[in-house]
Image: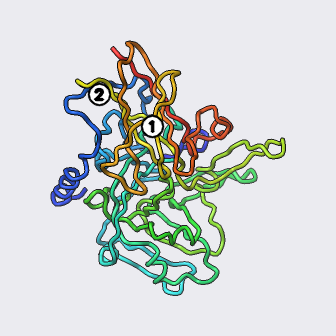
Amino acid sequence: MYYLPRREFIAQGSAALAALAIFHSRFAQAFPSRAGETVIPWLDQPQPNPVPAVIQSQLVWEDLDSWVTPNEKFFSIAHFDRPTIDANAWKLEIDGLVKKPLSLSLADLKARARQEVVFTVECSGNHGFPFFTGGIGNARWAGTPLAAILEEAGVKEDGIEVVFWGTDVGDIALKDNNRDVKMHQNFARSMSLADATNPNNILCYEMNGAALPAPNGFPVRLIAPGWYGIANVKWLKRIEIRNRRFMSLLMARDYVTIREEEHNGETVWAETSVGRALLKSAPARVTRGDAGYRITGAAWGAPIAKVEVKIDDGPWTEATIDHAEEAEFAWKVWYLDWKDPSKGEHTVTSRATDTSGKVQPAMDDPVIAKKHTYWESNGQVTRRVSIA
């Protein structure tokens, strides 16, 4: 088992490949690339990944050339083991405080109403470590609505919490009142009943026109648009309804943000469990073409109103958002033509503003500077590039 505590860090067959190729040909055209342009690598490359079993793959920002992230380039994280699941034998149990417990096969789920959503999934620790800057990807997810299944099961009146249990499992050592406790537990996260029955949530079995890949949760995972990746539970095996808040390893002891807050002149230390995604943007790449230099990036985590770019210590300049392909929960790709940059090293920073007027915070903003954990790392991203 590979797991990092709070202070250290935490498909199938030719038919599927053919479907994926068709999907890419349809959706890879919107990205604002220019024929013949050359990508200039960032100077500040991520450090070597010290936990390859935990973080199996990451997005390489310089390779971002399509609105949809191909399955083979999509990031994958496992907190415990990476289970091998027989789809023919797999069942999803819905139990706990329900009037009608259910046991559903993959075929049962596929026979139900189908729903698709394009959703950009980001790990809340993305950009929280020098080796982890590509924990993000945008995909078209397909499955069946979760709310209808919960309605069929019939949640009892005292049911308030929906727990999603994964097949992945590991041993966790804890110290409790000087006793050594070893917990053998499955991955588990929960939502309130109101959050779980959001009509956007799906039990997902398909990714970008192909069966859900094993690294991304085969055969079925939760897709909860608008939430950080940790809440989108992979390798699902059980959905349980409880009558009290569920406090798991990955909700109460880890994936917890600790922040200093000011209240009436007093500093209060607050701990909150990671949940919904936050407003964010990042420069993806700088390219050089016959028409000059261009900076391209993405913005996500909220309805985006605009994105601005700052080069070195210059003014903020509004970028152009590419509207060729868009979706409510998907990132927006943006670009800024960079006129006659001087030779030498430069910094490139982006910031997004959402439709309510909220601005992506700078790294010295108290909401970031007074945060003492690496989760919810949505501060402004600065990259370094050299112009020859």
Q: Amino acid at mark 2?
A: Val
Q: Secondary structure at mark 2?
A: strand
Residue 187 place in picture, x, y as percent: 51, 59
Q: Residue at coordinates 33% horizontally, 29% vertically from top-left? A: 294
Pointers 1 and 2 in contact (CB under 8 A)?
no
Q: Is residue 363 above or below residue 186?
A: above
How far apart marks 1 and 2 lie (CA) works out to 16 Å
Q: Is residue 219 above or below residue 300?
A: below
Residue 264 place in picture, x, y as percent: 84, 45
Total count of labels: 2
Q: Secondary structure at mark 1?
A: strand
Q: Where does the C terminus fall, quadrant-wise?
A: top left
The residue singled out by tag 1 in the image is: 282
Q: Amino acid at mark 1?
A: Ala
Mark 1 or 2 closer to N-term?
Answer: 2
Query: Within 10 angstroms of label 1, few (less than 14), some, or many (20 or more) residues?
Result: many
Q: Residue at coordinates 18% horizontally, 55% vertically from top-left? A: 22
Query: Within 10 angstroms of label 2, few (less than 14), some, or many (20 or more) residues?
Result: some
Residue 158 place in picture, x, y as percent: 64, 80
167, 380: nearer the viewer: 380
Q: Residue at coordinates 49% horizontally, 57% vertically from top-left? A: 226
Residue projecting furthest to the bottom: 99
The residue singled out by tag 2 in the image is: 39
Q: Is residue 191 above or below residue 66?
A: below
Q: Is residue 188 above or below residue 174?
A: below
Q: Residue at coordinates 27% horizontally, 61% vertically from top-left? A: 211
Residue 317 place in picture, x, y as percent: 47, 31
Whether residue 370 can be seen here? yes
Whether residue 58 can be seen here? no
Colouring rule applied to residues? rainbow
